[in-house]
Image: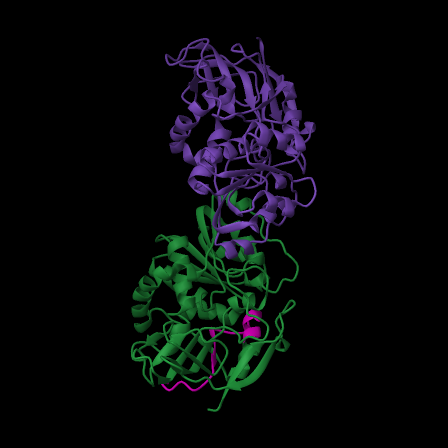
Chain colours: A purple, B green
């Protein structure tokens, strides 16, 4: 406990992210100064938005500077605190980034109760990905019972919650994923009505078969050919919450997108959103989802890499669709498991 | 007055529409049977949506069948009526299509008072194009005073109304048009704050200069490169009422569209709409716009071709951007002028 291992951004990716874009550095241990909270990172969350932070293209958040520690949501345990709201041993959710230790005043930390739900869920189903699913589906998708809700990256941290919440609302839930194994998980474990493997056979025909009554909500995480095919299946007045376009994240030149004529035909809506605009909805989201997680109705899956040093490869795997479940890094042992 | 000249759809266009897609036919005069209204067409409206009706691709309305009279909005004068709501000499707006005479029960006709505004306005600023502008701008664009509203095809029947209504609402109005002459008309006659000629020089730079505070509403009529450039200028929470994609109407293969990443960055909304879904808003639209037209604050311009036989070439001209003002055909003399 004399060094604080960190992973810093060494260079901006050109096209695909590689290990060479990161630097592993042993920095000095941070110290508590004034009213501060020192904590040890247990879990680091890896998320698609990180590709945007590594780039300096215009986005909704400033990029990580070259030489800075990579950003990321974390679950940590307090080691030392001079802030009366926290004490040693507490578990907290924060945004400490790719490092073993962090210190701050503590205002941004949220205390976690390990007796209610596992602490790692604060990074997955009851964290940013789960709340993203809730806000996009409920506030933009506005699913009505009997409607068909489609979600891409359906086995992922956001998509898995979208489909399960759609079922809670009485909808037909159709997932899209990239392997047969993921598709089986989506239907057999998560309870979606159907799942289309976008890598096998005729995508349009498979989507039509999975959505015999058309598509009312397409919760879009991926973009590309899947989105183009889905737009043609939209029903009148359909809604497309646009959460991500991971298929284009590595694009170097300015690529095109889908033909928008289907939006005219179906009078449909595409709306981009960012979960951080909707802090006012976090309370409602957690109030509805926490009991569903506790009761086992809302399932989740984690894909945990061990050790901070594994983070670059795990992030690359996320962009390549190699992960199966919420991508996490166990930076130090989880004492609650 | 013994024949009823009609223009019928002879073949579906492959790519651009040509004169060979139409047939000029002299049919028999229609006769009043039962409670009917016989009228002579004075003005026929030519509109971009007609390209869709000539095609049998999936759209929001059924295509015109090969051999059928081309559809279209009309202003006519009643010749003979056995319907007590109409009498000979009355002026009416209807949907009689590309022909000199029509007869029907009259339920679908709207009586026009030539003393309030010119009867041709029922096809332009106070007809379907004007109401399209009103509904798309007010209900989807939701312009707020001080915001920037951009509209493509700005000298056209819809675009010219969009920009003028934006000015009425206290917005900065920026037009996009294809000739210097149209641009001068848009700024000097219609009172837009700026107009960009999309055919001259660097489109992105010109749009940036015309929209120093970004774009809050893009009323989209055209699509293509202009839309792609505009998406990158959207402010946070911007709205894009999607009214038409005329740049792609002649596409034979399935072309792509704009990269949608800017929608994520700006949390913006694109929403397709069709004016015919919004009949409930016609009253409000006409109530606000009729006095503006009478007082001269809401200006309009007509591009009138003479004689029914001129309709095919005038429609082709509309698709090529040759018209300057609302494209109309004077099928018979206007007795009010």
Name above or below for residue A143 compared with residue A305: below
- Residue sitting at 58 percent across and 48 percent down? B259
- Residue B332 colored in magenta in the image: yes
Q: What stretch is highlighted in magenta?
A: B315-337
The answer, for residue A160, to whether it is visible in the render is yes
- Residue B66 colored in magenta in the image: no
Name above or below for residue A183 compared with residue B63: above
Q: Nearer the viewer, residue B164 or B185?
A: B164
Q: Nearer the viewer, residue B101 or A26?
A: B101
Left-right relation of B99 to A46: left
Figure quadrant of residue B13: bottom right
Where residue B144 appears, as percent x and y from the top left, is: 36, 52
Where residue B63 appears, as percent x and y from the top left, is: 55, 66
Where residue B231 appears, as percent x and y from the top left, is: 52, 50
Q: Nearer the viewer, residue B276 or A87?
A: B276
- Residue sitting at 64 percent across and 44 percent down? A206
The answer, for residue B172, to whether it is visible in the render is no
């Amino acid at each position: 406990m004399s060094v604080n291992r960190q992973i810093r951004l060494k260079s901006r990716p050109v096209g695909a992210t590689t290990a060479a874009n990161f630097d592993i550095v042993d920095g000095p241990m941070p110290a508590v100064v004034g009213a501060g909270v020192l904590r040890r990172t247990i879990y680091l969350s890896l998320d698609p938005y990180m590709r945007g932070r590594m780039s300096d293209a215009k986005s909704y958040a400033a990029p990580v500077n070259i030489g800075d520690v990579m950003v990321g949501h974390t679950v940590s345990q307090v080691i030392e605190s001079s802030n009366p709201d926290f004490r040693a041993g507490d578990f907290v959710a924060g945004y400490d980034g790719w490092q073993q230790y962090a210190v701050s005043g503590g205002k941004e930390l949220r205390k976690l109760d390990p007796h209610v739900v596992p602490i790692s869920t604060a990074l997955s189903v009851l964290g940013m990905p789960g709340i993203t699913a809730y806000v996009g589906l409920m506030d933009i998708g506005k699913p009505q019972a009997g409607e068909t809700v489609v979600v891409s990256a359906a086995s992922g941290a956001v998509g898995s919650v979208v489909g399960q919440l759609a079922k809670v609302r009485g909808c037909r839930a159709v997932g899209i994923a990239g392997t047969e194994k993921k598709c089986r998980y989506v239907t057999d474990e998560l309870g979606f009505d159907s799942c289309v493997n976008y890598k096998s056979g005729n995508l349009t025909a498979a989507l039509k078969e999975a959505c015999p009554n058309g598509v009312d909500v397409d919760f879009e995480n991926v973009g590309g050919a899947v989105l183009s095919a889905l737009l043609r299946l939209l029903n009148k007045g359909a809604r497309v919450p646009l959460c991500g376009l991971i298929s284009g994240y590595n694009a170097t030149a300015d690529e095109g997108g889908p033909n928008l004529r289907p939006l005219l035909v179906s009078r449909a809506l595409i709306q981009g959103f960012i979960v951080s605009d909707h802090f006012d909805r976090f309370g409602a989201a957690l109030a509805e989802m926490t009991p569903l997680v506790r009761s086992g109705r809302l399932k989740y899956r984690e894909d945990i890499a061990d050790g901070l040093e594994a983070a670059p490869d795990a992030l690359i795997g996320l962009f390549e669709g190699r992960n199966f479940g919420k991508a996490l890094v166990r930076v130090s042992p989880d004492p609650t498991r």
